[in-house]
Amino acid sequence: MTDPVLAHALEQRETLLARLAAFVAHPSVGADPACADGMEAARRFLETRLSEAGFSNLQRLVAPDGSGQPAIYAEWLGAEGAPTLIVYGHYDVQPPDPLDLWHSPPFEATIRDGRLYGRGVSDDKGPMLIALEALIAFLEVEGRLPVNVRVFLEGEEETGSPSLAPILSAHRELLQADAVLSADGARWRADLTTINVGNRGNGGFEITVRTAAKDLHSGRYGGVVPNALHVLAGLVAGLRDAEGRIVVAGFLDGVEDPSPEDRAAIAAIPFDEAALMAQLDTAPAGEPGYSFLERLWLRPTLEVNGMWGGYTGAGGKTVIPNTAHAKFTMRLVPGQDPERVRDAVLRHLRASCPPGATLTVTDERGWSGAYAVPDANPLLLAAEEALQETTGDRPIRVRIGATLPLTEIVLGTLGLDTVMFSFSTADEDYHAPNEFLRLSAIDEGLAAWVALLRRVGLQDPADYAASRP
Amino acid sequence: MTDPVLAHALEQRETLLARLAAFVAHPSVGADPACADGMEAARRFLETRLSEAGFSNLQRLVAPDGSGQPAIYAEWLGAEGAPTLIVYGHYDVQPPDPLDLWHSPPFEATIRDGRLYGRGVSDDKGPMLIALEALIAFLEVEGRLPVNVRVFLEGEEETGSPSLAPILSAHRELLQADAVLSADGARWRADLTTINVGNRGNGGFEITVRTAAKDLHSGRYGGVVPNALHVLAGLVAGLRDAEGRIVVAGFLDGVEDPSPEDRAAIAAIPFDEAALMAQLDTAPAGEPGYSFLERLWLRPTLEVNGMWGGYTGAGGKTVIPNTAHAKFTMRLVPGQDPERVRDAVLRHLRASCPPGATLTVTDERGWSGAYAVPDANPLLLAAEEALQETTGDRPIRVRIGATLPLTEIVLGTLGLDTVMFSFSTADEDYHAPNEFLRLSAIDEGLAAWVALLRRVGLQDPADYAASRP
């Protein structure tokens, strides 16, 4: 028998789609100052819906210095004795560029072949509305929620969440809760029931190598002075051994090898590596001794994202470049300390500079550590049960190779763990043209959110505090 | 007692300077289509002077397909039994950009501190007029020249001489001679009497490395797919061993090690390597086992002139680039076959590509071999004697690390050797703002040209044919 709250939510499916279309029509591109009106319209849309649904204490939370985009806050705290969840989503979206590659206008939600197309439908307006409408269905049918909820909707996720930590820290009292339930953070695959239990951290810097006071003529000086591009190539190549292992001393400090149980669990996950390689038109690469998914989820990376120097225009120029640049980023795994990793890599690069070459750090990016939900987190366990109930499959625990700064920021500021419960999927082109959301995600998401909230409503808040090791 | 021809030429020094100023005022920038009038005015200037001085058979030589800038030709062939020289110069100049760095207008010849400033004064309008006025002084004082002369003044030297080989090949009958005497090709240093006996060749190509169908997200794929920038860095670094030796199989085929005599001669040349390194703010680099000048003159190079890929804008982008590019040029030494060197380097690069990576050659530059004047070339011997007579110092035989395509093109098309007898100096900023010519070069050049022509006039043309091994 269908849960009456879910039945109500499913009946309202067309209304939800219409609401999502109206939400998508507000171009809330946080990176583009010209979209300030779209950001404000998106905020008003959410505030109106939360207010009419019966949430209280509606307000905008801003960083203490007043900078950045406000987060929307609202609460419903009538479930005495039940856990309190912060329900997270974000209302800002990626820029729509390049516009000419879209098959329908990015800010007009359009259905084709069982998919809803439009900027933000997958990241994160669609998954966020699914979550909010599941909450609202409880209020509409039963007049109450099974759990206490603090809705927290960020406006800077796509621009690196610069205000998130300041906002959370400044409103620690208001945001008391037992865990964070995120409507952001895509499902891995459409063909497998999974739950994400961790993500890698990241960070990076840009270096400039300089080998002489100026560019030199390749005829008059070729063979007698260093070439900044040769030096840079040597630095990049020297980060790995011939088999692809990163050889930077200290880089792996704190990283534990996966246990036999972890390796067995990962090996059991159905995954067609060959099909993915064929689709990407490449061959596997990386650290020997680890499987594809182990490398992706459990091992750190050290990648050059951009590299340049010398003459890069048409034709040729017989120059020995005196400067060369490279942008590096790292993906970090549990156990790695971002600051120590940064220092280790820079120490290695500096020590590898030959005579006549100097290295300077010319830009630095934010550093964020890896995150893993504790195995026994009650919200994680409830989420697994809810997924098993609604999909029929026991979800497989997976990680993601990418970085979700939210998880580490929430842990660092509020001391709370986060469970990702978005119903978008990683292949939905959400940072690219023709972003889409599978329409099936609406029913799947509503069912899972209703089932999850019911289960959490039966839990003891004390179990949350006990779950973090 | 001063040679009466030289005495006459020196008396005309101010007239020569005025002529040079008028010549510089014609902006003959061959690379700039807007300077077509300047090119034509420069040609008319030369034709007028050659004609009024008594040269005959004045004509413009063009490539058979009619393309490109014509060369100016004129002859004086009244020295029966004496050798015939092609006297070479070029009337085109480098672009004057960046204009704002000039201290006086580039096309207004300006004297400051014993130097004449202006675009082309050093390369090659000044040295060319010195040569022509030395010839004309003979005609004015003695009514004849000691040697037969075919004046050949090119208009495409600064744009890579694309028409030079076609023009020479098409006019092989007209251009019969015993050697080429070039008024282009700068002296090495102002503080040392030298003569250049060889130059390195060159050539190059651009490669593109591709590792996947598209750029990939560094979180979702970091550690499991190849990175085009890592591959390119490995390719560039893999061209050399840890000590700096080029390890490309076949690269050094045909290159002979310098003889003990060659090494001793080079070691005897006064050269302050430390002062140069301090001036360039760098440290020496290159192949171990060879001195600085040996590396510069006698050893080939393999340099990356430009390298780029991935995200190179402000800030960061977490991308695994799927393409990377590099521009390579080589400087070749005697014994190296350009085509075989090209193939050897590409074979090495291709063989070094890891699985998943492909390499394509996306651009190719012209290839030209190294050149060396035969030790016993009579024009070289006469030039050394003339320099000893006029400077008091026995000139030191030097080479240049750069490439003068003229030498190899003349040898390939006409079978003639070339002696460089310019009186510009390599430090005169001739491809940069504030190009200058030392005023002392005028007297030095006139004296040396007069002395050289007298000596060649006493030579037997048969000795020229016998001098090439």
Image: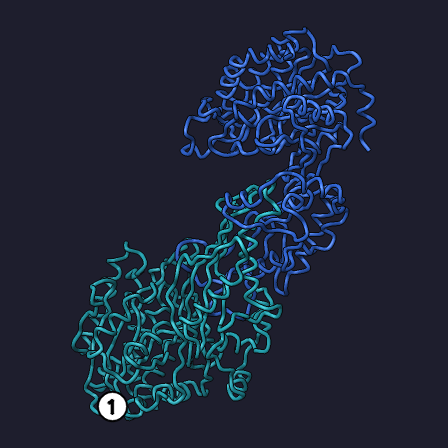
Chain colours: A blue, B cyan
Where is mark 1, residue-wise?
B82
Residue B82 lies left or right of residue B245; in this view the side is left
In this view of the protein, can residue A1 be seen by the observer?
yes
Q: Nearer the viewer, residue B33 or A173?
A: A173
B27 sits to left or right of B171: right
In the picture shown, does residue A424 fall above or below B277?
Answer: above
Q: Which residue lies furthest to the left in this view?
A: B57
User: Is residue A211 or residue B287 the one in the foreground?
Assistant: B287
Q: Is residue B382 above or below residue B98?
A: below
Q: Which of A190 and B27 is in front in this view?
A: A190
Number of marks in picture: 1
Q: Is residue A344 left or right of residue A186?
A: right
Nearer the observer, B441 or A67: A67
Amino acid type assigned to the residue bearing label 1 in the image: Ala
Residue neighbourhood size for the residue with mark 1, other residues' Cα within 10 Å, grouped as few (<14), some (14–19), many (≥20)? many
Image quadrant in which you'd find residue A55: top right
Pick the quarter of the image with the C terminus of chain A. Answer: top right
- Above or below: residue A49 compared with residue A230: above
Residue B316 location in percent, x, y? Answer: 57, 42
Query: Residue A342: x and y, percent?
Result: 69, 48
Residue lying at 42% horizontally and 85% vertically, measured from the top left: B391
